[in-house]
Image: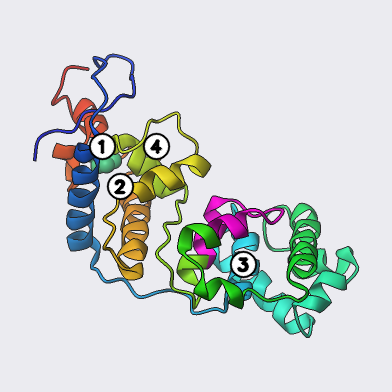
Amino acid sequence: MPVPQTSEPRRGVARLPPAPDAAKRALALEAHRRLCAEYGCPITYFHALAPLDELVSSLLSHRTKNADSARAFKALREQFPDWAAVRDAPVAEVERAIAGVTWPEAKAPALQRTLRALTERQGLLDLSHLAGMPEAEAAAWLASLPGVGPKTAAAVLSFSTLRGRALPVDSHHHRVAARLGLIPKTLAVGPAHAVLAALLPDDWDAQQFYDHHQVLMRHGQRCCFFRGPACGRCVLRDLCPEGQARLGTVPA
Ligand code: SF4
C-alpha cells in the first residue's frame, strides 16, 4: 500500500497535498485489517447495559479510569432504587456516591441535569425509543441532551444493548488516527467522530464499528503512546507519516 499523505504540517516535514478521501478510506481499512490481526477481532463487547444505564456509565467515565467509573456506577445502583431517585436526590448524596471519579462535584449536578432533561423530553426516564431510529438520528437526539457530546452518544449506541453502528472516539483512538493522517492533528475529538465514521464502509455491521474503535484505542494504549510511541515495532509504521518521520524513513 502506498504511503498515505497528510495535509497536516509538521515541523521539519514537507507539507504534502491533502489525500483524497478514497485514499483515507483505504488507509483506514488497511489499518483496521492489520490491527484486527494484532489484537484479535471480533472483540467481545465489554458491556451489555441497557441504553440508559450506558448513558449514566458513559457520563461518569469521562477522564476517569474504568475501574473507578465502574465502582461509582455500582454505588449509584446500590444506593438508589432507580435513576429517578438519582435524578431527584440532594446533589450532595449523588456526589458522595460517585466520589471515586474525577470531578464528582461537577459530574453529580451534570448527571442530574441530563436525567431531568430526558424526563422532560420523554415523559419518563427511558431510551428504548432509540432502538428503532437510524444511528445518525439517534446520535443527534442523544447529543441534544445537556452534557451529552458525540463520544457519549456513540458510546450509548455502540456499547449498550442497542448495539448500533456507531464509532466512539476516545483520546487514544484520536491520537492514532491523527498520527496516521486520517484526520488533521488540529481536529478536536468531538468533530473527529463524524469524519472518522465517514471513512468506514457503508456495509459494516455494528461489531465491525466496535472492533474498529477497540483496535485503534488498544493501539494507542499499547504501542502509539502519547509520549514516545513505539514506532519501531508498530505494524502500521509503513503507513504512518508520523512513524516514518520519527524513524528517519523520510527526511525530518
Ligand atoms: S508508526 Fe508510530 S506514530 Fe505511527 S501509528 Fe505506529 S506507533 Fe503511532
SS at mark 4? loop
Q: Earlier in the sequence, mark 2 or mark 4?
A: 2
Please give the residue where the numbered disc 3 appears in the rendered image. 55
Give 151 or 93, whichever is nearer the viewer.
151
Say few, some or many: other residues with alpha carbon within 10 Å of mark 2 (under 14 / 14 to 19 / 20 or more): some
Callout 3 amino acid: Leu
Confirm or deny contact between disc 4 and disc 1 (CB under 8 A).
no
Q: Is residue 160 above or below residue 252?
A: below
Confirm or deny contact between disc 3 and disc 1 (CB under 8 A).
no
191 left or right, relative to 95: left
The structure residue drawn at horizontal position 68% and vertical position 76%, both measured from the top left corner, is 126
Question: Which image quadrant for residue 202?
Answer: bottom left
Dominant SS in magenta: helix
Q: Earlier in the sequence, mark 1 or mark 2?
A: 1
SS at mark 3? helix
43 left or right, relative to 152: left
Callout 2 amino acid: Leu
Say few, some or many: other residues with alpha carbon within 10 Å of mark 1 (under 14 / 14 to 19 / 20 or more): few
Please give the residue where the numbered disc 4 appears in the rendered image. 227
Chain part drawn in magenta? 139-156
Numbered badge on residue 199: 2
135 left or right, relative to 183: right
Question: Which image quadrant for residue 15?
Answer: top left
The structure residue drawn at horizontal position 45% and vertical position 51%, both measured from the top left corner, is 169
Please give the residue where the numbered disc 1 appears in the rendered image. 21
Say few, some or many: other residues with alpha carbon within 10 Å of mark 4 (under 14 / 14 to 19 / 20 or more): few
Pick the quarter of the image with the N terminus.
top left
